[in-house]
Image (cartoon, helix red, strand yellow):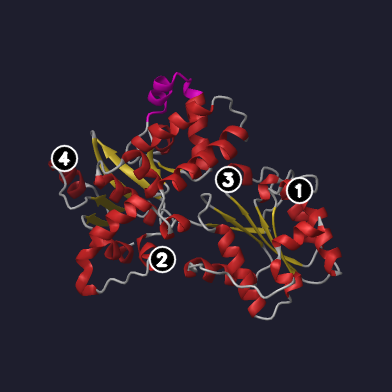
Amino acid sequence: MKDVLYQYNPWWEEAFKNENVKPREKYLVELRKYLELKQIVILTGLRRVGKTTLMKLIIEEQIAAGVEPCRIFYVSLDDYLLHRNNIIEIINEFRKVHKIKIEEKVYLFLDEVTYKNDFHVQLKNIYDSQNAKIFVASSSASMLRDKKASLTGRAITLEIKPLDLEEYLYFNGITIRKRDRQLYKSYFLEYCKVGGLPENVLNPNREYLMNLVDDIIQKDITAFHAIKNHQIVRDYFTLLMERSGKQLSINKIGKILGISPDTSKRYLTFFESTYLIHLLPRWGKTNQKLLSAKKIYASDLGIKYMFMGERDLGSYFENYIYLLLRSRKNLYYLYENTTEIDFLTEDKILIESKFYAELNKKQEKLFNEYPARKKLVIDSVEMLDSLLKEI
């Protein structure tokens, strides 16, 4: 095991520098704050969204700040060579290699933590009995679920999201001055094709995104949930992407694929738990929120583009607005008398997305008459800044 641990931690033997990496400062700011807290930091989000890179950047910063490199430990727990060892055994080996006592402070970065059985209990034991600052990462919300509440009060969760448009421009070295704001539309259309996964932004490749989706379906859905028919799960995801931005009928998808409504519902939750999709409930009384069809959005526009191409650019714009707002507000869609308005926040801000277009008459009537405290029509990429200021 010792040799494997040295391979994961090159800073134990030589100077360490993250090469050719663009830092995502908004997340690094959060992680730096969490360094001062005792709690375990859980990084979650879509596969390949940059969780490992963020951990490596924090490692580099800690070494630069004077932490002894031998007190910083990184490992990916999906490594086959470590499959016989539990987390505590691996940490004990690390301490043993460097002769670090239990009461001496170490920094632990545990990637793909959900590959280990009982990881919640093991993390609790390390948290309670050792002097350790712990960061962990996983790409599955369902596997991270703490059914026994072992980590209640002991953990902070931070979801890492795909790059937004501003980050996309930064990663590509593009600065748009105020006098050139009309350029935002053409760059947004490029962003729709590429999406916001950091590696793909730097080296756009359709095959990269296809492999990512296949990876998630195989590892996080069909293998984890013991589903034998892989193709039907792929077909299910294709139908989800074709319906992104629309109300989703679980029963209709089930009929198309020849599966039961219960199976269709289960598959939907699997895709949501891997962060490939997000679901938006309808505004209304509790039973309406629970029973009405949800709208579906892609977590990354590049993945949506693989399935949709350039059809319905308005749906990309709406999807992007949803991604911008979902971490800021509790969101719903408004649906009354067969007419829909895209978003209603819990604190009664009504928002309609129109990609260089206007509301139809029914939408305009509902929009004008609905008793919201603030109403916004976002009809261009240039208006996105003002949306965020208003929200």
Residue 100 visible in the picture: no
- Between circles 2 and 4, the one closer to the viewer is 2
Amino acid on which the number 3 mark rests in the picture: Ser
Q: Does 255 appear in magenta?
A: yes
User: What's the mark number on residue 362?
Assistant: 4
Left or right of residue 213: residue 324: left
Callout 3 secondary element: loop
Which residue in the structure is indicated by mark 3?
A: 140
- Quadrant in which residue 57 is drawn: bottom right
Residue name at image x 61 percent, y 64 percent: 55
Q: CA distance from mark 3 to mark 2?
A: 26 Å
- Quadrant in which residue 141 is drawn: top right
Pick whichever of labels 2 and 1 is earlier in the sequence. Answer: 1
Q: Are marks 3 and 2 in contact (CB under 8 Å)?
A: no
Pick whichever of labels 1 and 4 is earlier in the sequence. Answer: 1
User: What residue span does the magenta drawing correspond to?
Assistant: 249-262
Callout 2 secondary element: helix
Q: Are marks 4 and 3 in contact (CB under 8 Å)?
A: no
Q: CA distance from mark 2 to mark 4?
A: 41 Å
Location of the C terminus by quadrant is bottom left
- Between circles 1 and 4, the one closer to the viewer is 1
Left or right of residue 66: residue 289: left
Residue name at image x 19 percent, y 47 percent: 369
Q: Does residue 85 lie above or below 257 as drawn?
A: below
Pick whichever of labels 1 and 3 is earlier in the sequence. Answer: 1
Which residue in the structure is indicated by mark 1?
A: 81
Left or right of residue 8: residue 96: right
Which residue in the structure is indicated by mark 2?
A: 171
Q: Are marks 1 and 3 in contact (CB under 8 Å)?
A: no
